[in-house]
Image: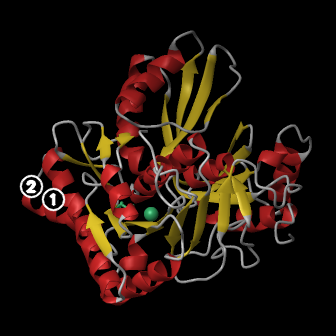
Amino acid sequence: MTSTSAGLVGRPLVQKYGGTSVSTPARIRKVAQRVAASRRHRGGVVVVVSAMGDTTDRLHSLAHQVSRRPAEREMDTLLSAGETVTAPLLAMALDDLGVAALSLSGAQAGIRTSHSHTRAHILDVVPTRVIAELKAGRTVVVAGFQGVNEALDTTTLGRGGSDTTAVALAAALEARECEINTDVKGIYTADPRIVSRARLLAGISYDEMIELAALGAQVMHPRAVEIAELYDLPVRVRGSFDDGPGTLITRSPRMEQKKRVRGIAAEEKVAKLTLIGVPDQPGIAASIFTPLSEAGISVDVIIQNVSRDGVTDLSFTVASGDLAQAETIVGRVSKKIRAAGVASDAKVAKVSIVGTGMLGQPGIAARMFKALADAGINIEMISTSEIRITCIVARDRVAEAVRALHKAYQLDQA
Ligand code: ASP
Ligand code: MG
Protein backbone atom coordinates (compact mmCIF):
# COMPACT_ATOMS: atom_id res chain seq x y z
CA MET A 1 0.00 0.00 0.00
CA THR A 2 1.30 3.42 -0.91
CA SER A 3 1.68 5.22 2.33
CA THR A 4 2.97 8.35 3.81
CA SER A 5 1.60 10.21 6.74
CA ALA A 6 4.76 12.31 6.87
CA GLY A 7 4.04 15.91 7.58
CA LEU A 8 1.17 15.19 9.94
CA VAL A 9 1.58 16.35 13.50
CA GLY A 10 1.14 12.78 14.72
CA ARG A 11 -0.24 9.48 13.55
CA PRO A 12 -3.96 9.65 12.87
CA LEU A 13 -6.63 7.58 14.57
CA VAL A 14 -9.04 5.63 12.38
CA GLN A 15 -12.47 4.88 13.82
CA LYS A 16 -15.03 2.67 12.13
CA TYR A 17 -18.72 2.73 13.09
CA GLY A 18 -20.91 -0.21 12.08
CA GLY A 19 -24.44 -0.18 10.68
CA THR A 20 -26.26 -0.51 14.01
CA SER A 21 -24.32 2.44 15.45
CA VAL A 22 -25.49 4.75 12.66
CA SER A 23 -28.96 3.27 12.09
CA THR A 24 -30.92 6.45 12.96
CA PRO A 25 -30.32 10.23 12.76
CA ALA A 26 -30.17 10.32 16.57
CA ARG A 27 -27.44 7.68 16.59
CA ILE A 28 -25.49 9.52 13.90
CA ARG A 29 -25.58 12.61 16.12
CA LYS A 30 -24.36 10.49 19.04
CA VAL A 31 -21.52 9.12 16.92
CA ALA A 32 -20.66 12.70 15.97
CA GLN A 33 -20.29 13.51 19.66
CA ARG A 34 -17.96 10.54 20.10
CA VAL A 35 -15.88 11.59 17.13
CA ALA A 36 -15.76 15.17 18.40
CA ALA A 37 -14.43 13.90 21.73
CA SER A 38 -11.66 11.94 19.97
CA ARG A 39 -10.36 15.00 18.18
CA ARG A 40 -7.82 15.63 20.90
CA HIS A 41 -5.87 13.21 18.82
CA ARG A 42 -2.76 14.96 17.47
CA GLY A 43 -2.73 13.26 14.10
CA GLY A 44 -6.40 13.87 13.46
CA VAL A 45 -9.30 11.49 13.11
CA VAL A 46 -10.51 9.54 10.09
CA VAL A 47 -13.94 7.96 10.45
CA VAL A 48 -15.15 5.07 8.30
CA VAL A 49 -18.90 4.40 8.29
CA SER A 50 -21.20 1.56 7.27
CA ALA A 51 -24.64 1.92 5.74
CA MET A 52 -27.46 2.83 8.15
CA GLY A 53 -28.95 -0.26 9.82
CA ASP A 54 -30.15 -2.84 7.32
CA THR A 55 -29.87 -0.51 4.31
CA THR A 56 -27.57 -2.86 2.37
CA ASP A 57 -30.07 -5.71 2.75
CA ARG A 58 -32.89 -3.46 1.57
CA LEU A 59 -30.93 -2.30 -1.48
CA HIS A 60 -30.19 -5.93 -2.26
CA SER A 61 -33.85 -6.81 -2.09
CA LEU A 62 -34.82 -3.82 -4.26
CA ALA A 63 -32.49 -5.08 -6.98
CA HIS A 64 -34.12 -8.48 -6.93
CA GLN A 65 -37.56 -6.91 -7.16
CA VAL A 66 -36.72 -5.28 -10.48
CA SER A 67 -34.50 -7.95 -11.98
CA ARG A 68 -34.10 -11.68 -11.93
CA ARG A 69 -30.36 -11.43 -12.43
CA PRO A 70 -29.11 -7.95 -11.52
CA ALA A 71 -25.86 -7.12 -13.31
CA GLU A 72 -23.01 -7.08 -10.82
CA ARG A 73 -21.70 -3.73 -11.97
CA GLU A 74 -25.08 -2.09 -11.32
CA MET A 75 -25.39 -4.01 -8.05
CA ASP A 76 -22.16 -2.41 -6.83
CA THR A 77 -23.28 1.10 -7.72
CA LEU A 78 -26.54 0.39 -5.91
CA LEU A 79 -25.09 -1.27 -2.78
CA SER A 80 -22.41 1.39 -2.35
CA ALA A 81 -25.21 3.96 -2.04
CA GLY A 82 -25.84 2.93 1.57
CA GLU A 83 -22.43 4.12 2.76
CA THR A 84 -22.61 7.09 0.40
CA VAL A 85 -25.61 8.29 2.44
CA THR A 86 -24.10 7.81 5.90
CA ALA A 87 -20.79 9.60 5.32
CA PRO A 88 -22.17 13.07 4.44
CA LEU A 89 -24.80 12.77 7.19
CA LEU A 90 -22.09 12.25 9.78
CA ALA A 91 -20.00 15.09 8.31
CA MET A 92 -23.04 17.41 8.62
CA ALA A 93 -23.63 16.32 12.21
CA LEU A 94 -19.97 17.01 13.00
CA ASP A 95 -20.21 20.42 11.39
CA ASP A 96 -23.13 21.18 13.68
CA LEU A 97 -20.91 20.50 16.67
CA GLY A 98 -18.37 22.96 15.34
CA VAL A 99 -16.05 20.24 14.06
CA ALA A 100 -14.66 20.98 10.60
CA ALA A 101 -15.38 17.79 8.69
CA LEU A 102 -15.86 16.49 5.19
CA SER A 103 -17.03 13.23 3.67
CA LEU A 104 -15.20 11.29 0.97
CA SER A 105 -16.34 8.39 -1.19
CA GLY A 106 -14.16 5.29 -1.35
CA ALA A 107 -12.78 6.51 -4.68
CA GLN A 108 -11.96 9.97 -3.28
CA ALA A 109 -10.22 8.35 -0.32
CA GLY A 110 -8.03 6.40 -2.77
CA ILE A 111 -9.43 2.90 -2.18
CA ARG A 112 -8.33 1.16 -5.40
CA THR A 113 -9.63 -2.32 -5.97
CA SER A 114 -9.63 -5.29 -8.30
CA HIS A 115 -12.27 -5.55 -11.02
CA SER A 116 -14.38 -8.29 -9.45
CA HIS A 117 -17.69 -6.63 -8.71
CA THR A 118 -19.46 -7.37 -5.38
CA ARG A 119 -16.34 -9.01 -3.94
CA ALA A 120 -13.50 -6.74 -4.95
CA HIS A 121 -10.14 -6.80 -3.19
CA ILE A 122 -8.26 -3.69 -2.23
CA LEU A 123 -5.13 -3.48 -4.38
CA ASP A 124 -3.80 -0.18 -3.14
CA VAL A 125 -4.74 2.78 -1.00
CA VAL A 126 -3.63 6.20 -2.19
CA PRO A 127 -4.85 8.50 0.57
CA THR A 128 -3.44 11.76 -0.82
CA ARG A 129 -6.70 13.65 -0.34
CA VAL A 130 -7.25 12.23 3.15
CA ILE A 131 -3.80 13.37 4.23
CA ALA A 132 -4.30 16.84 2.74
CA GLU A 133 -7.57 17.27 4.63
CA LEU A 134 -6.05 16.04 7.89
CA LYS A 135 -3.22 18.52 7.47
CA ALA A 136 -5.78 21.24 6.96
CA GLY A 137 -7.22 20.26 10.34
CA ARG A 138 -10.38 18.62 9.06
CA THR A 139 -11.96 15.40 10.30
CA VAL A 140 -12.43 13.04 7.37
CA VAL A 141 -15.46 10.75 7.07
CA VAL A 142 -14.99 7.96 4.53
CA ALA A 143 -17.77 5.79 3.08
CA GLY A 144 -16.81 2.21 3.90
CA PHE A 145 -17.32 -0.94 1.83
CA GLN A 146 -16.69 0.83 -1.50
CA GLY A 147 -13.78 1.41 -3.82
CA VAL A 148 -12.99 2.10 -7.42
CA ASN A 149 -11.43 -0.15 -10.05
CA GLU A 150 -9.16 0.69 -12.95
CA ALA A 151 -12.14 1.41 -15.19
CA LEU A 152 -13.27 3.99 -12.59
CA ASP A 153 -16.32 1.86 -11.83
CA THR A 154 -17.53 1.65 -8.24
CA THR A 155 -16.85 -1.69 -6.57
CA THR A 156 -17.84 -3.15 -3.21
CA LEU A 157 -15.74 -5.32 -0.94
CA GLY A 158 -18.20 -8.05 0.04
CA ARG A 159 -20.56 -8.07 3.01
CA GLY A 160 -19.00 -6.65 6.14
CA GLY A 161 -16.45 -4.84 3.97
CA SER A 162 -16.39 -1.59 5.91
CA ASP A 163 -14.06 -3.24 8.41
CA THR A 164 -11.68 -3.89 5.53
CA THR A 165 -11.88 -0.25 4.40
CA ALA A 166 -11.06 0.94 7.91
CA VAL A 167 -8.10 -1.35 8.43
CA ALA A 168 -6.63 -0.80 4.94
CA LEU A 169 -6.94 2.96 5.30
CA ALA A 170 -5.40 2.84 8.77
CA ALA A 171 -2.47 0.83 7.42
CA ALA A 172 -1.92 3.25 4.54
CA LEU A 173 -2.08 6.25 6.91
CA GLU A 174 0.23 4.52 9.37
CA ALA A 175 -2.47 5.14 11.93
CA ARG A 176 -1.70 4.66 15.57
CA GLU A 177 -4.67 2.39 15.95
CA CYS A 178 -7.82 1.32 14.14
CA GLU A 179 -10.95 1.30 16.29
CA ILE A 180 -13.84 -0.91 15.28
CA ASN A 181 -16.82 0.60 17.07
CA THR A 182 -19.71 -1.81 17.19
CA ASP A 183 -22.78 -2.93 19.11
CA VAL A 184 -20.84 -5.13 21.54
CA LYS A 185 -18.18 -4.00 24.02
CA GLY A 186 -15.41 -6.11 22.54
CA ILE A 187 -14.41 -9.75 22.14
CA TYR A 188 -15.68 -12.12 24.80
CA THR A 189 -14.51 -15.57 25.91
CA ALA A 190 -17.83 -16.81 24.45
CA ASP A 191 -21.08 -15.29 23.20
CA PRO A 192 -22.52 -13.57 26.31
CA ARG A 193 -26.04 -14.43 25.10
CA ILE A 194 -25.12 -18.10 25.53
CA VAL A 195 -22.76 -17.94 28.50
CA SER A 196 -23.81 -15.48 31.18
CA ARG A 197 -20.34 -15.57 32.78
CA ALA A 198 -18.50 -14.82 29.53
CA ARG A 199 -15.68 -12.32 30.11
CA LEU A 200 -14.57 -9.40 27.98
CA LEU A 201 -10.99 -10.03 26.82
CA ALA A 202 -8.49 -7.19 27.23
CA GLY A 203 -6.25 -8.55 24.49
CA ILE A 204 -6.22 -11.18 21.78
CA SER A 205 -3.81 -12.07 18.96
CA TYR A 206 -4.50 -11.61 15.26
CA ASP A 207 -4.42 -15.35 14.69
CA GLU A 208 -6.93 -16.01 17.46
CA MET A 209 -9.19 -13.27 16.15
CA ILE A 210 -9.04 -14.66 12.60
CA GLU A 211 -10.11 -18.07 13.91
CA LEU A 212 -12.87 -16.57 16.04
CA ALA A 213 -14.07 -14.28 13.23
CA ALA A 214 -14.12 -17.13 10.73
CA LEU A 215 -15.92 -19.28 13.27
CA GLY A 216 -18.89 -17.05 13.59
CA ALA A 217 -17.95 -14.45 16.19
CA GLN A 218 -19.69 -11.87 13.98
CA VAL A 219 -17.80 -8.90 15.39
CA MET A 220 -15.19 -8.33 12.72
CA HIS A 221 -14.53 -9.40 9.16
CA PRO A 222 -11.68 -11.97 9.05
CA ARG A 223 -10.16 -10.35 5.96
CA ALA A 224 -9.80 -7.09 7.87
CA VAL A 225 -7.92 -8.88 10.65
CA GLU A 226 -5.58 -10.44 8.09
CA ILE A 227 -4.70 -7.02 6.69
CA ALA A 228 -4.12 -5.68 10.21
CA GLU A 229 -1.74 -8.56 10.91
CA LEU A 230 0.15 -7.95 7.68
CA TYR A 231 0.82 -4.33 8.67
CA ASP A 232 1.16 -4.95 12.41
CA LEU A 233 -1.66 -2.50 12.98
CA PRO A 234 -3.26 -2.58 16.44
CA VAL A 235 -7.05 -2.92 16.18
CA ARG A 236 -9.36 -2.13 19.07
CA VAL A 237 -12.89 -3.54 19.09
CA ARG A 238 -15.11 -1.50 21.37
CA GLY A 239 -18.71 -0.47 21.98
CA SER A 240 -19.83 2.55 19.95
CA PHE A 241 -21.61 4.02 22.94
CA ASP A 242 -19.48 2.59 25.72
CA ASP A 243 -16.45 4.18 27.34
CA GLY A 244 -14.67 0.93 28.13
CA PRO A 245 -11.33 0.11 26.46
CA GLY A 246 -12.73 -2.91 24.59
CA THR A 247 -10.39 -5.59 23.23
CA LEU A 248 -7.03 -4.80 21.68
CA ILE A 249 -5.97 -7.09 18.84
CA THR A 250 -2.19 -7.24 18.41
CA ARG A 251 0.51 -9.74 17.47
CA SER A 252 1.18 -10.91 21.00
CA PRO A 253 -1.15 -9.63 23.66
CA ARG A 254 0.58 -9.27 26.98
CA MET A 255 -2.55 -9.78 28.99
CA GLU A 256 -3.75 -13.18 30.05
CA GLN A 257 -0.84 -14.92 28.39
CA LYS A 258 -1.12 -17.93 30.65
CA LYS A 259 -4.56 -18.80 29.35
CA ARG A 260 -4.19 -21.70 27.00
CA VAL A 261 -7.66 -21.45 25.56
CA ARG A 262 -8.74 -17.91 24.80
CA GLY A 263 -12.32 -18.42 23.75
CA ILE A 264 -15.12 -20.69 22.62
CA ALA A 265 -16.83 -20.12 19.29
CA ALA A 266 -19.98 -21.64 17.88
CA GLU A 267 -21.40 -21.65 14.38
CA GLU A 268 -24.89 -22.95 13.77
CA LYS A 269 -25.29 -22.61 10.02
CA VAL A 270 -23.54 -25.87 9.20
CA ALA A 271 -24.68 -28.99 7.36
CA LYS A 272 -23.10 -32.40 7.00
CA LEU A 273 -22.96 -34.57 3.90
CA THR A 274 -21.88 -38.22 3.84
CA LEU A 275 -21.00 -40.26 0.79
CA ILE A 276 -21.64 -43.87 1.68
CA GLY A 277 -19.80 -46.85 0.27
CA VAL A 278 -17.14 -44.96 -1.66
CA PRO A 279 -14.63 -47.17 -3.51
CA ASP A 280 -11.26 -46.77 -1.80
CA GLN A 281 -8.95 -45.86 -4.66
CA PRO A 282 -6.71 -42.98 -5.78
CA GLY A 283 -8.40 -39.88 -7.22
CA ILE A 284 -11.75 -40.34 -5.49
CA ALA A 285 -11.40 -37.42 -3.06
CA ALA A 286 -10.33 -35.16 -5.92
CA SER A 287 -13.35 -36.21 -8.00
CA ILE A 288 -15.64 -35.23 -5.12
CA PHE A 289 -14.07 -31.97 -4.00
CA THR A 290 -13.02 -30.51 -7.36
CA PRO A 291 -16.58 -29.93 -8.63
CA LEU A 292 -17.55 -28.49 -5.24
CA SER A 293 -14.71 -25.97 -5.32
CA GLU A 294 -15.52 -25.12 -8.93
CA ALA A 295 -19.03 -24.26 -7.77
CA GLY A 296 -17.53 -21.94 -5.15
CA ILE A 297 -18.60 -24.14 -2.25
CA SER A 298 -16.07 -24.33 0.52
CA VAL A 299 -15.84 -27.59 2.33
CA ASP A 300 -14.87 -27.53 5.96
CA VAL A 301 -14.39 -30.49 8.29
CA ILE A 302 -13.64 -33.66 6.34
CA ILE A 303 -13.54 -37.22 7.64
CA GLN A 304 -12.75 -40.35 5.69
CA ASN A 305 -13.27 -43.59 7.54
CA VAL A 306 -10.90 -46.54 7.47
CA SER A 307 -11.96 -48.69 4.57
CA ARG A 308 -13.40 -52.16 4.94
CA ASP A 309 -13.78 -54.47 1.96
CA GLY A 310 -12.46 -51.75 -0.35
CA VAL A 311 -15.18 -49.21 0.41
CA THR A 312 -15.29 -46.34 2.85
CA ASP A 313 -17.60 -43.53 4.02
CA LEU A 314 -16.60 -39.93 3.51
CA SER A 315 -18.22 -37.07 5.45
CA PHE A 316 -17.72 -33.34 5.27
CA THR A 317 -19.44 -30.12 6.25
CA VAL A 318 -20.54 -27.11 4.22
CA ALA A 319 -22.30 -23.86 5.11
CA SER A 320 -26.07 -24.43 5.48
CA GLY A 321 -26.74 -22.08 2.57
CA ASP A 322 -24.66 -24.30 0.26
CA LEU A 323 -26.31 -27.59 1.24
CA ALA A 324 -28.85 -27.88 -1.58
CA GLN A 325 -26.29 -27.17 -4.30
CA ALA A 326 -23.71 -29.45 -2.65
CA GLU A 327 -26.28 -32.28 -2.51
CA THR A 328 -26.92 -31.99 -6.23
CA ILE A 329 -23.23 -32.01 -7.08
CA VAL A 330 -22.35 -34.85 -4.73
CA GLY A 331 -25.34 -36.87 -5.95
CA ARG A 332 -23.97 -36.61 -9.48
CA VAL A 333 -20.45 -37.60 -8.36
CA SER A 334 -21.81 -40.50 -6.31
CA LYS A 335 -23.33 -42.09 -9.43
CA LYS A 336 -20.18 -41.54 -11.44
CA ILE A 337 -17.85 -43.16 -8.90
CA ARG A 338 -20.42 -45.86 -8.06
CA ALA A 339 -20.79 -44.99 -4.39
CA ALA A 340 -23.69 -46.51 -2.46
CA GLY A 341 -25.44 -43.20 -1.82
CA VAL A 342 -25.50 -39.78 -0.17
CA ALA A 343 -26.87 -38.86 3.24
CA SER A 344 -27.19 -35.36 4.66
CA ASP A 345 -27.82 -33.80 8.04
CA ALA A 346 -28.96 -30.16 7.92
CA LYS A 347 -29.07 -29.82 11.71
CA VAL A 348 -25.49 -29.85 12.92
CA ALA A 349 -23.29 -27.11 14.40
CA LYS A 350 -19.65 -26.38 15.03
CA VAL A 351 -18.19 -25.68 18.44
CA SER A 352 -14.52 -24.70 18.73
CA ILE A 353 -11.93 -23.85 21.31
CA VAL A 354 -9.36 -21.27 20.17
CA GLY A 355 -6.07 -20.16 21.69
CA THR A 356 -2.44 -19.70 20.65
CA GLY A 357 -1.48 -20.95 24.10
CA MET A 358 -2.59 -24.47 23.25
CA LEU A 359 0.31 -24.96 20.83
CA GLY A 360 2.18 -27.99 22.04
CA GLN A 361 0.11 -28.35 25.19
CA PRO A 362 -0.88 -31.95 25.79
CA GLY A 363 -4.24 -32.61 27.36
CA ILE A 364 -6.11 -29.69 25.82
CA ALA A 365 -8.03 -31.83 23.35
CA ALA A 366 -8.72 -34.55 25.89
CA ARG A 367 -10.30 -31.99 28.20
CA MET A 368 -12.59 -30.82 25.41
CA PHE A 369 -13.77 -34.33 24.60
CA LYS A 370 -14.28 -35.17 28.26
CA ALA A 371 -16.31 -32.02 28.90
CA LEU A 372 -18.59 -32.84 25.97
CA ALA A 373 -18.87 -36.46 27.05
CA ASP A 374 -19.75 -35.46 30.61
CA ALA A 375 -22.54 -33.28 29.19
CA GLY A 376 -23.79 -36.27 27.17
CA ILE A 377 -23.06 -34.52 23.87
CA ASN A 378 -22.03 -36.75 20.98
CA ILE A 379 -19.08 -35.62 18.84
CA GLU A 380 -19.81 -36.37 15.20
CA MET A 381 -16.60 -35.06 13.65
CA ILE A 382 -13.38 -33.43 14.81
CA SER A 383 -10.93 -31.13 13.06
CA THR A 384 -7.93 -29.20 14.32
CA SER A 385 -5.54 -26.42 13.39
CA GLU A 386 -2.53 -25.34 15.41
CA ILE A 387 -4.59 -23.01 17.55
CA ARG A 388 -8.09 -24.46 17.28
CA ILE A 389 -10.04 -27.67 17.88
CA THR A 390 -13.48 -27.95 16.32
CA CYS A 391 -16.17 -30.55 17.02
CA ILE A 392 -19.32 -31.08 14.99
CA VAL A 393 -22.30 -31.73 17.27
CA ALA A 394 -26.08 -31.79 16.96
CA ARG A 395 -27.35 -28.24 16.55
CA ASP A 396 -29.82 -28.46 19.44
CA ARG A 397 -26.93 -29.25 21.83
CA VAL A 398 -24.48 -26.55 20.73
CA ALA A 399 -25.36 -23.91 23.33
CA GLU A 400 -24.94 -26.50 26.05
CA ALA A 401 -21.59 -27.50 24.51
CA VAL A 402 -20.37 -23.89 24.62
CA ARG A 403 -21.35 -23.59 28.29
CA ALA A 404 -19.70 -26.90 29.20
CA LEU A 405 -16.43 -25.91 27.48
CA HIS A 406 -16.41 -22.41 28.95
CA LYS A 407 -16.58 -24.03 32.36
CA ALA A 408 -14.08 -26.81 31.63
CA TYR A 409 -11.39 -24.28 30.66
CA GLN A 410 -12.33 -21.92 33.50
CA LEU A 411 -12.74 -19.02 31.13
CA ASP A 412 -14.92 -17.13 33.58
CA GLN A 413 -11.78 -16.53 35.66
CA ALA A 414 -9.24 -13.92 34.59
N1 ASP B 1 -22.98 -2.19 4.51
C1 ASP B 1 -22.19 -3.35 4.16
C2 ASP B 1 -22.86 -4.62 4.67
O1 ASP B 1 -23.92 -4.54 5.26
C3 ASP B 1 -20.79 -3.25 4.62
C4 ASP B 1 -20.59 -3.17 6.12
O2 ASP B 1 -21.49 -2.81 6.85
O3 ASP B 1 -19.47 -3.45 6.57
O4 ASP B 1 -22.36 -5.67 4.47
MG1 MG C 1 -19.94 -5.59 10.44
| Residue contact between numbered discs 1 and 2, judged by CB atoms under 8 Å | yes
Q: Which residue is drawn at 73% across and 45% down?
A: 389
Measured along the vertical axis of the image, is residue 303 above or below residue 101?
above
Q: Is residue 385 rendered to the left or right of residue 323?
A: right
In this orientation, which residue lies closer to the viewer: 190 or 314?
Answer: 190
Is residue 151 visible in the rendered image? The answer is yes
Secondary structure type for disc 2: loop
- Please identify the quadrant where the N terminus is shown: top left
Q: What amino acid is at disc 1?
A: His
Q: Is residue 350 rendered to the left or right of residue 36?
A: right
Measured along the vertical axis of the image, is residue 262 above or below residue 82?
above
Q: Is residue 243 rendered to the left or right of residue 409?
A: left
In this orientation, which residue lies closer to the viewer: 180 or 195?
Answer: 180
Is residue 69 visible in the rendered image? The answer is no
Residue topped by disc 1: 64
Question: In the rendered image, which quarter is residue 333 located in?
Answer: top left
The chosen color scheme is secondary structure
Instruction: Provide residue 208's location: percent of width, then percent of height.
Output: 68, 50
Residue topped by disc 2: 67
Question: In the rendered image, which quarter is residue 375 located in?
Answer: bottom right
- Please identify the quadrant where the C terminus is shown: bottom right
Measured along the vertical axis of the image, is residue 323 above or below residue 39?
above
Some atom of ligand 1 lies within 8 Å of the CB belonging to the residue at label 2 = no
Q: What amino acid is at disc 2?
A: Ser
Within 10 Å of disc 2 (Cα), the crowding (few <14, some 14-19, many 20+) is: few
Instruction: Provide residue 411's location: percent of width, then percent of height.
Output: 82, 66
* Residue projecting furthest to the top: 282
